[in-house]
Image (cartoon, grey):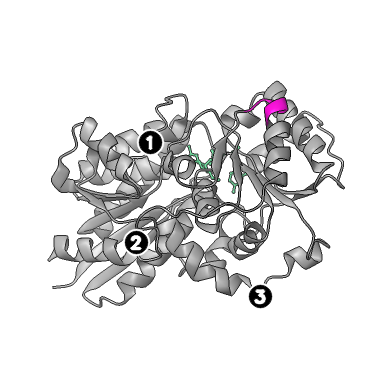
């Protein structure tokens, strides 16, 4: 009998997590795939272009929920997704990561008594001011299959009372995508277009509410980036949330030090990242990708839900204060590439393990 897996994506960091699982499931004709896009991210460069880069098929259903407060956005996703899930039905709902779409879809599925699989379960920053932390905890409480990327994620889940039999340590689908798409990214020309071929440069991403919603914090970080950009030019593809804050507060950025771009495609991004001297970010996934690539990463946060990237990898937490960002940035630029240690099972085969578990669960 054919079994139906319905996957839900909504925001940019979901797309590269689902892509390898979708490809792997295609090899199992007895599993039917149904893709729902909530529309949490809706700009072409936050969604359509990344979908295209990843060769993901058009979603079967697009909910078009757009933005709003957390309550509004989560509520709209739940209302619309419940209609789809009730009419479509599914044997398993697959959610990834920690965005509002992840939690909203997991809650709806659980209430309709459809089992939920959560990819990237058990990550904890222990900082409940982060909306993502709440999303992670709620999703993990309702999930039936919990796929983890690292041993400490399993410990977090066990500590919260999740049954050991529900937890599967499978590795990291972000790294599956990184390894799979990097050769395809060779064809991109953004580095040449920016005149940076063969030159040292850094790469910046910034979008956490804690860094960009408060004007003093944002100004402090941007000033520090501009100063560091005097030592080495920094390329800065700007998230819409951050763009809005920069424009609203009329923050001036000298373009020779900080090259501001619109969000770029996944292939352009991984190519740019793979040749950079240094990455400064507050993203979760980029901490993992830089660890796999052996590129120094300064995380502009006080905590991380991905401590393995600090313990084994190239990641360093520098907080959101200007002086520290400049000092650590200068240190990192002087460093020669260290020894690369990639965490266990970050080997490009996580999706294969996930699909095997799902297949066994459904049969
Ligand atoms: C969301 C996720 C975060 C993830 C990030 C990656 C939640 C709570 N947060 O944060 O975990 O790391 O995505 O990008 O789910 N906007 C646009 N165009 C878009 C998308 C958003 O203009 O395509 C604007 C929205 O109108 C809103 C702001 O950006 O004003 C924030 O969008 P939102 O979806 O709330 O969260 P992100 O900050 O993108």
Q: Is residue 322 magenta?
A: yes
Which numbered disc, 3 or 1, marks the residue that appears first in the sequence? 1
Between the residue at mark 3 and the residue at mark 1, the CA separation in whole angstroms equals: 36 Å
Camera-nearest label, 3 or 1: 3
Ligand 1 positioned in quadrant: top right
Residue at 19 percent across and 47 percent down: it is 144
**Spot occupied by residue 50 in the image (x, y as percentages of width and height):** 56, 61
Which numbered disc, 3 or 2, marks the residue that appears first in the sequence? 3
Above or below residue 99? Residue 16 is below
Quadrant housing residue 211 = top right
What is the number of the mark on residue 135? 1
Q: Give the range drawn in magenta.
A: 320-324
> Judging from the image, what secondary structure is the residue with disc 1 in?
helix
Between the residue at mark 2 and the residue at mark 1, the CA separation in whole angstroms equals: 22 Å
Is residue 50 visible to the viewer in this orientation of the structure? yes
Cβ of mark 1 under 8 A from ligand 1: yes
Residue at 42 percent across and 25 percent down: it is 128
**Main secondary structure type of the part rendered in magenta:** helix
> Judging from the image, what secondary structure is the residue with disc 3 in?
loop
- Judging by the rendered image, the residue that carries numbered circle 3 is 187
């Amino acid at each position: 009998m054919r079994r139906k897996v319905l996957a839900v994506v909504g925001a940019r960091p979901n797309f590269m997590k689902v892509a390898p699982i979708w490809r792997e499931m295609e090899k199992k004709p007895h599993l039917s795939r149904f893709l729902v896009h909530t529309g949490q991210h809706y700009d072409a460069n936050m969604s359509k272009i990344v979908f295209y880069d990843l060769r993901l098929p058009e979603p079967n259903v697009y909910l078009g929920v757009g933005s709003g407060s957390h309550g509004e956005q989560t509520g709209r996703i739940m209302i619309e997704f419940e209609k789809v899930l009730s009419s479509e039905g599914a044997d398993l709902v697959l959610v990834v990561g920690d965005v509002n779409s992840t939690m909203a879809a997991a809650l709806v599925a659980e209430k309709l008594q459809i089992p939920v699989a959560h990819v990237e379960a058990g990550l904890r920053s222990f900082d409940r001011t982060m909306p993502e932390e709440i999303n992670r905890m709620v999703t993990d409480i309702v999930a039936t299959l919990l796929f983890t990327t690292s041993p400490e994620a399993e410990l977090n889940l066990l500590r919260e009372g999740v049954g050991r039999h529900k937890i599967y340590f499978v590795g990291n689908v972000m790294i599956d995508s990184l390894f799979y798409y990097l050769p395809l990214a060779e064809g991109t020309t953004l580095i040449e277009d920016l005149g940076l071929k063969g030159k040292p440069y850094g790469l910046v991403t910034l979008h956490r509410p804690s860094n960009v919603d408060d004007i003093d914090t944002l100004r402090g970080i941007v000033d520090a980036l501009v100063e560091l950009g005097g030592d080495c030019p920094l390329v800065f593809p700007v998230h819409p949330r951050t763009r809005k804050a920069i424009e609203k507060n009329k923050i001036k950025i000298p373009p020779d030090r900080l090259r501001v771009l619109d969000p770029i495609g996944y292939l352009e991004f991984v190519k740019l990242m793979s040749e950079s001297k240094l990455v400064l970010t507050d993203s979760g996934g980029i901490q993992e990708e830089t660890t796999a690539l052996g590129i120094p990463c300064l995380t502009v946060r006080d905590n991380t839900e991905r401590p393995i990237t600090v313990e084994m990898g190239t990641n360093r937490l520098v907080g959101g204060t200007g002086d520290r960002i400049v000092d650590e940035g200068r240190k990192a630029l002087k460093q020669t590439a260290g020894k690369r240690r990639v965490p266990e099972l970050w080997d490009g085969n996580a999706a294969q393990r996930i699909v095997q578990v799902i297949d066994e669960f459904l049969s």
